[in-house]
Structure formats: C-alpha cells, structure tokens
C-alpha cells in the first residue's frame, strides 16, 4: 500500500522508500531508469539512492525547458519524424521506468505555440514506437505526478485546494480502489451492450468484443510485473482509473460537451455525431478553430473513437463552475473519450499520428443492463 501523510510532499526520502519498496518492489540487480524535470529532481535523487540501497542500478535522465524548446521550435523539420531506434535499445535493458511529472516548468508557454505541423511530425511514430516497446521490452512503468503550479492557472482551481486534493488522492485506500476497479473491469470485458450518457446530452452505445481493459490502482503486484502486456505493468501515483478501447465500429450516437479545452484554452459548446466509430459534424461555440487547426496535420484514423477512461479515486474531485474547469484523470466517476490511435495495446484497429481527448462530466455508464456509474458517481 502507498501512503502520503498530510504535508508529506516534501519528505522525499520516505516517499522514495515507499515507491521503491512498496509500489515497485525493486530488488537487487534490477535496472531502473528515472526520468524527471528540474521540479522532480529532489525526489528522483532520493529514489536513485533507495535503488542503490536495494543493490539495484539507477540512472537519472532529466528533461529541461531549454532542451524541449530547442526540440519543439529549432530542430530541423526533416528530423522531427526520425524513428528513435536508440530509445528502444535502451528500454530493452530496463526492469523499471519511473517517470516523475511535470517534466517542464512552463508547459503552456512551451507547447501552447508550437506549429501543429511540427507536433504532427513528432507524433507520427507514436503508435509504431508503442508497438515496438510492447513487443521488445519487459519493464514495469511507474508514473509519479507531483502538484504542478501551472494547473491552477490553466483550470482556475485554487493552488491550496489542488495540492491538498492531490496528496489526499495519493494516500487514498488503494485496496478499495482496486476492488471497485476490478468489478467494473470484469463487467466491461466482452460486454455486448454498453451505454454512455451525460447530463450535457452525450448519448453513446457500443460493445467491447475482445478488447482489453486495464485497471490502474497505484500498486504493482507480482502478477502485473510479470505480465506479457505492457499496459498491465503500469502504475500511476496518484492512481486509480480504468482504461479501455471499445470496438470502434460499434460506437454510435452523439457527444455533447459544455466545457472542454484545446491547447490550454477553453473550448465550449462542443458537439459531434459518431457513426460506426467515426466522428462528424463537429461544432463548437468557442474554440472550434483551435481543434480544427490541431487535428488538420495529423494522418491516419484521427477522427475515429479510440479509448475511454473512467476515474476511480474518491479523493480526487471534478470541479466545474463558471471560473473553474478541473477534471483530473483519476477523479472517481469522471470519464473521458479519445479519438486517435489504439492499436498498440488494446487489440484495437485505429492507427493515427495524433488525436484529442474530450471530458465527459457527470456521466452514466451502463454495462449489459447494470448501471455502474450514475451522474458521475460510481455505484457500490
């Protein structure tokens, strides 16, 4: 079990010990890659120290705003789509990859003004990369999210409220989260008739077929660490969500979203239809031009429904008011819908160089006649 007590966010040695010992179960001889930005370095170095104490082998890799800016704006366009074979060779040697976010200090200023064509080139090999990693690596992946000072400026939430919620979610009852997630996961597997609606007006139906469903509960069990499926070897802290791909050709209906975001800005009054998994008639009262500009340079099945997520962590909350639009991935009952690629791990058929994720607030999810989420609340 993973716990953080109130005010524990700065107790990096104890935090690192729990990650290495309880969350990951790192042992002597393991090779551990630790990726961070400048904000995460205090935690990264303590994790590396704990890895050494276990008799294992750590390596810290740092991302900075300076080098990211050079990649995003200055790297020759001809090289943006180079396939990173070197990266796969490195990953073959790993037993664990630990990623600490945020990895940059000013993501909005860095990523908010990048030419979408450059972003499309950077993302052109994502699906191939994921497929190569899934086939040729065996490492377990732990993603640790630290509170970001940019979140309040982007979402409108008060910093103190956000930080308190973040650490409460990190120290939630993960045994209960795992139990809740497993029940819903078992219902989703092979489901023939799934209905998804929201108070805003979304109304979708789909089936699951042989598609995989992944449950993250913030803990890596021995069974998960030894799984042949890459996404099964994944843990997020704070954690707690289900991640799954429907049979894309079975998805039909309409999507209506009052508030969304595009490139860090508001996108309001969104609606589109879905027929056999493909979206059309996209409209937005505000921010629609941003979406069109973002999606235009991408290739492949970029307008096809790919994945859905359901948050499971009761300590993380969705807050939507006139001034606040805060909907973290792991918030219990929060759902999101993505378009783009899903062929790397879900048994999916969608291949695309990029996509977009839409928030589904106060959703109701019904699986083969059983309501498991009602108006954004998970049913016990």
Image: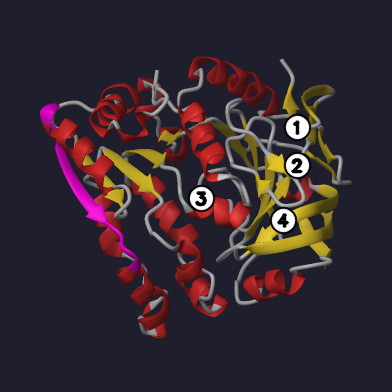
State which mark lies toward you, 3 or 1. Answer: 1
Please state, as top left, top right, bottom left or bottom right, where the C terminus lies in the image: top right
Q: Kindly identify which residue carries mark 2.
A: 361
Instruction: Give the quarter of the image for residue 289.
Output: bottom right
Residue 370: image location, x then y, percent: 81, 21
CA separation in Å, label 2 and label 3: 27 Å
Q: Could you tell which of marks 2 and 4 lies nearer the N-terminus?
A: 4
CA separation in Å, label 2 and label 1: 7 Å
Q: Could you tell which of marks 4 and 1 lies nearer the N-terminus?
A: 4
Give the magenta-colored segment's residue range: 53-65
Residue 107: image location, x then y, percent: 46, 62
CA separation in Å, label 4 and label 3: 26 Å
> Which secondary structure lies at badge 3?
loop
Q: Kindly identify which residue carries mark 1.
A: 376
Residue 218 vs residue 338, the one in the foreground: 218
CA separation in Å, label 4 and label 1: 16 Å
Q: Could you tell which of marks 2 and 1 lies nearer the N-terminus?
A: 2
Is residue 47 inside the magenta stretch?
Answer: no
Q: Kindly identify which residue carries mark 3.
A: 344
Residue at position x 32%, y 41% in the image? 98
Q: Could you tell which of marks 4 and 3 lies nearer the N-terminus?
A: 4
Please state, as top left, top right, bottom left or bottom right, where the N terminus lies in the image: top left
Residue at position x 42%, y 83% in the image? 77
Instruction: Give the quarter of the image for residue 378.
Output: top right
């Amino acid at each position: 079990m993973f716990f953080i007590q109130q005010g524990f966010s700065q107790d990096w040695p104890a935090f690192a010990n729990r990650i290495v010992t309880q969350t990951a179960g790192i042992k002597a001889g393991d090779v551990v890659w630790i990726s961070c930005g400048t904000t995460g370095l205090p935690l990264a170095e303590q994790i590396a120290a704990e890895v050494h104490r276990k008799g294992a082998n750590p390596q810290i890799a740092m991302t900075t705003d300076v080098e990211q800016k050079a990649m995003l704006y200055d790297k020759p366009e001809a090289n943006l789509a180079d396939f990173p074979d070197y990266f796969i060779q490195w990953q073959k040697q790993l037993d664990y990859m630990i990623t600490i976010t945020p990895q940059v200090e000013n993501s909005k200023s860095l990523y908010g003004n990048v030419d979408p064509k450059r972003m499309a080139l950077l993302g052109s090999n994502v699906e191939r990369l994921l497929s190569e990693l899934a086939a040729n690596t065996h490492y377990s992946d732990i993603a640790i999210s630290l509170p970001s000072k940019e979140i309040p400026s982007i979402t409108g939430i008060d910093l103190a409220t956000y930080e308190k919620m973040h650490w409460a979610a990190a120290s939630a009852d993960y045994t209960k989260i795992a139990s809740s997630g497993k029940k819903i996961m078992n219902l989703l597997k092979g489901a023939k008739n799934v209905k998804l609606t929201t108070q805003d007006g979304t109304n979708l139906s789909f089936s699951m077929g042989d598609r995989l469903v992944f449950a993250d509960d913030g803990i890596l069990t021995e069974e998960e660490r030894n799984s042949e499926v890459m996404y099964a070897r994944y843990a997020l802290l704070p954690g707690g969500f289900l991640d799954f791909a429907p049979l894309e050709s079975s998805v039909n209906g309409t999507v209506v979203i009052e508030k969304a975001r595009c490139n860090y800005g508001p996108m309001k009054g969104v609606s589109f239809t879905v027929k056999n998994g493909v979206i059309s008639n996209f409209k937005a009262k505000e921010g629609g031009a941003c979406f069109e500009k973002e999606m235009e340079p991408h290739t492949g099945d970029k307008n096809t429904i790919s994945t859905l997520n359901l948050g499971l962590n009761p300590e993380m909350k969705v807050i939507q008011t006139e001034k606040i639009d805060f909907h973290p991935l792991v918030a219990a009952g929060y759902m999101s819908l993505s378009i783009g690629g899903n062929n790397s791990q879900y048994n999916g058929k969608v291949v695309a160089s990029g996509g977009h994720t839409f928030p589904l607030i106060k959703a109701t999810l019904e699986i083969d006649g059983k309501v498991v989420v009602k108006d954004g609340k998970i049913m016990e």
